[in-house]
């Protein structure tokens, strides 16, 4: 069930996947099908993979991500602030320790054009001291793979720390609890990102 939840929440294409290079904060594009065994190897800690953000056919995304990277204690406070801001606006954010020195906040959304998602993350993150946002641009460039973020619940190949999730009250979850949390999250309705949502952040 956890594999299916991950596919539904994070995966937009299965013809290839980014895999982190051991001891490096870099990824190779593996031009082979993304299988359930590959995802399981990630969860088991044998390899670490990322997930592409944009569907190359529709140019739509089904998640956005806010990245906080720096001094862990300081980044937690920044991420927590945005987490509760999003919840206060009626969204259902997921917060994750990245396994390195920071945090990711994910929002799972009904498929939306990449340009609208970009507008949304920029407006939401304004004045929030976010290190990076995904999507990073309005359209796909280069070979059309777009941007990727490390898939949660894996091990960072440089720091060799496993990422972990937080519950709705920001309580850290174990690997098993995190998997169960994603399974439950997959059942919930996806958030909507529309122009009215974007405009609601203006002036915050």
Image (cartoon, rainbow, N blue to C red):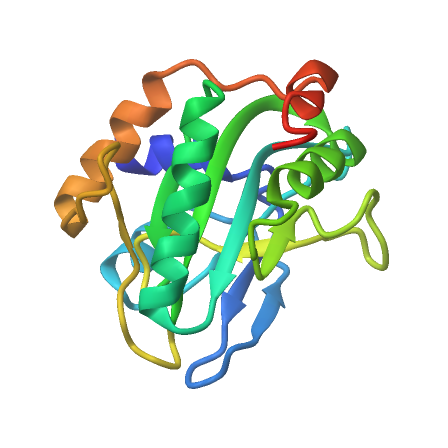
Using the image, determine if residue 38 lies above or below residue 6: below
Left of 3 or right of it: where is 180? Answer: left
Q: Residue 128: give x, y in percent of width and height.
A: 56, 50
Residue at the (51%, 19%) spot, across then down:
191
Where residue 8 sits in the image (x, y, percent)?
A: 45, 29
Q: Residue at x 42, y 86 (%)?
A: 23
From the viewer's side, name the closer residue of 127 and 111: 127
**Whole-percent x and y of residue 203?**
67, 31
Residue furthest bottom as drawn: 23
* Residue located at (52% from left, 56% from top): 67
Quadrant (top left, top right, bottom left, bottom right) of the C terminus = top right
Q: Could one spot residue 8 in this view of the protein?
A: no
Q: Is residue 141 left or right of residue 161?
A: right
Residue 112 lies, with reference to residue 40, above or below; the image says above
Q: Nearer the viewer, residue 22 or 77?
A: 77
- Kindly identify the residue that appears in the image at 64 percent across and 19 percent down: 197
Residue 114 at x, y percent in the picture: 75, 35
Left/right placement of residue 111 relative to residue 50 reads right
Quarter containing the N terminus? top left
């Amino acid at each position: 069930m956890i594999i299916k939840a991950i596919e539904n929440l994070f995966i937009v294409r299965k013809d290839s996947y980014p895999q982190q290079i051991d001891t490096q904060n870099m990824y190779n594009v593996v031009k082979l099908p993304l299988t359930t065994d590959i995802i399981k190897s990630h969860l088991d800690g044998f390899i670490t993979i990322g997930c592409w953000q944009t569907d190359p056919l529709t140019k739509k995304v089904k998640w956005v991500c806010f990245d906080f990277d720096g001094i862990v204690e300081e980044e937690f406070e920044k991420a927590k602030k945005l987490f509760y801001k999003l919840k206060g606006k009626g969204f259902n954010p997921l917060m994750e320790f990245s396994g390195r020195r920071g945090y990711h906040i994910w929002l799972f959304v009904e498929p939306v054009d990449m340009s609208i998602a970009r507008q949304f993350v920029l407006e939401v993150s304004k004045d929030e001291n976010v290190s990076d946002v995904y999507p990073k641009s309005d359209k796909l460039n280069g070979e059309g793979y777009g941007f990727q973020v490390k898939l949660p619940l894996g091990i960072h190949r440089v720091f060799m720390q496993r990422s972990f999730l937080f519950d709705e009250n920001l309580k850290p979850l174990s690997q098993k609890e995190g998997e169960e949390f994603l399974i439950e999250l997959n059942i919930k309705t996806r958030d909507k990102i529309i122009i009215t949502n974007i405009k609601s952040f203006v002036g915050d």
